Amino acid sequence: MGLIQLFEQILSRFDVLNPGDTVVLGVSGGPDSLVLLHLFVAVRERLNIHPVVFHLDHQIRGEAAEADARFVEHISKEWDVPVQIDRINVPALAAERRLSMEEAARMARYTALGQFAIGQNVRVIAVAHNADDQAETVLMHLIRGAGLLGLRGMLPVSPLSDYHLLAPIDESLLLIRPLLDITRADIEAYCIEHGLSPRFDRSNLDTTYFRNRLRHEIIPQLETVNPNIRVMLTRTASVMAAYYDFVKPHIDTAWDDILIELNDTCVQFDLEQWRTLPLAIQRATIRRASWHLRKPLRDIGYQHVEDAVDVAQRGETGAQATLPGGLLLRVDYNSLVIAAIDQQPPAPDWPLLAPNTVIAAPDIGEYLIPGSEWTFSLSVYDGPRSGPAWKALLADPWKTPFDAGVLSGSLHLRTRRSGDRLFPSGLGGTMKLSAFMINEKISAAWRDHLPLLVAGDHIVWVCGWRVDERFAVHTSTDKVWLAAFSHSGED
């Protein structure tokens, strides 16, 4: 079977292009992309698809890169294919983002392809990676350390949004690799057969680039041990991809079960549920959380993940583990938090105060909580002190009745201060407020923000938690007030 017929079969198997569709081709001018363009030109009438060429000058190679752009533009026009030439200063991008030149070029290329496709109202982008590229990718991931996700290598069809990009891209955009099962030798033979004269990028010989060293030095050495090493590596990718497809639904289910909070700055898991997961799923959820927060990350090393898993499995409250990209895993009381090192855990839905805030509340009335949707009120309570209504009142953490007849000093709300003590009801003695907060598993991040109802120098109520025994309502209490917080969204 000829390569053109095989190419048609591959496109049919992908099942992403319909008659009348346009497809954007990433064309560098080298052998792989020139053959990709030639094959699409060969089948475009029969399949009724319309290729459009996109070429990106990375501004790394000077005049040679300009010559590549002119070549791509010329050959596209000669074959009656629309062409767009763009330029991005990749060296400047690499310096700005602190990326390797390879990574910066890859991110720039995929981002530019995606933005061009969106501008053309196109949903499929084709690039020219071949079977040898796949073998190199798998070996590279194996050497650097990877799990199933990395050992899958490159996928024949995948959403472009899965890749590390410079800007968010529409999730409906697909990246296809129709040459992924075709060897470099077959591509070079096709060039000779059809009289194609591709451009030659001399930087592909520079073995200071890791991939080039694999291609020109390491794989040839491995071929002295196993002449079929390239085939073995591509088969490994296929096997691992199938395993990953089997495992992924389990990861997805576990992720949904343990997830408490997910936003652009923080991922929070239910700690108890996370600890019951199989080790493979624990590793996968930490990797996924890291990728969610730091999409440019390509390599989340084995040791980083293992250290994070160990802390998450065994660590006490406050235990931490560093992750790449300035991320930190932290064990909280009931949760596992992954966020930027300087990022606090997500704020709970409490009536929080800024540290050192003091709000005078000298009498019956309603008081606003600055910068919050919460209000605080004091009212006279003359309802029942037993039965369902009383139990319901005591069960509400943001309301408490207290004995107003024993107050000494004016009432106010404030945050904690050094030396604060209280007499928690039911504990039979005084204790430091800091110890009380630790015992009650109040998150360290919010202890300085929790409001306290105070009379003079005495804590009346650790709001949301416990009334001081000295102000608790007893059968002999004559004057009962109700302290309550309400949210503006409440009826």
Image (cartoon, rainbow, N blue to C red):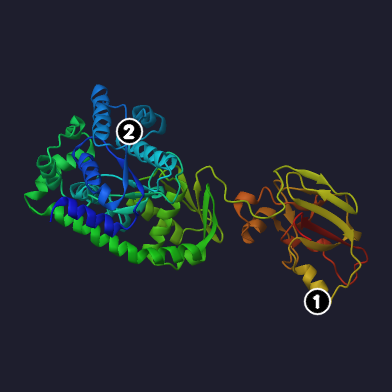
Residue 388: which disc? 1
Q: Mark 2 points at which residue?
A: 56
Please state if 54 lies on the left or on the right of 395 as rendered: left
488 displayed left or right of 317: right
Q: Residue furthest top?
A: 63
Report whether 105 appears left or right of 39.
right
Q: Residue at image x 64%, y 61%?
A: 440
Task: State the image quarter where residue 100 is shown.
Answer: top left
* Crowding near the residue tagged with mark 1, few <14, some 14–19, many ≥20 C-alpha atoms within 10 Å: few
Identify which residue is drawn at 85% across, 49% down.
361
Q: In which quarter of the image is residue 381?
A: bottom right
Residue 114 coordinates in the image, percent (x, y): 40, 42
Task: Say what secondary structure mark 1 lies in.
Answer: helix
Residue 183: x, y in percent? 15, 49
Residue type, label 2: Leu
Which residue ends up furthest to the right in the rendered image? 478
Q: Nearer the viewer, residue 396 or 204?
A: 204
Quadrant where the C terminus lies? bottom right
Q: Which amino acid does label 1 sit on?
A: Pro
Residue 281, quarter of the rendered image: bottom left
Residue 407 appears in the rendering: yes
Of residues 337 and 53, which is closer to you in this image? 53
Q: Marks 2 and 1, how far apart in space? A: 72 Å
Q: Which of marks 2 and 1 is nearer the N terminus?
A: 2
Q: Residue 383, position in %: x, y?
A: 89, 70
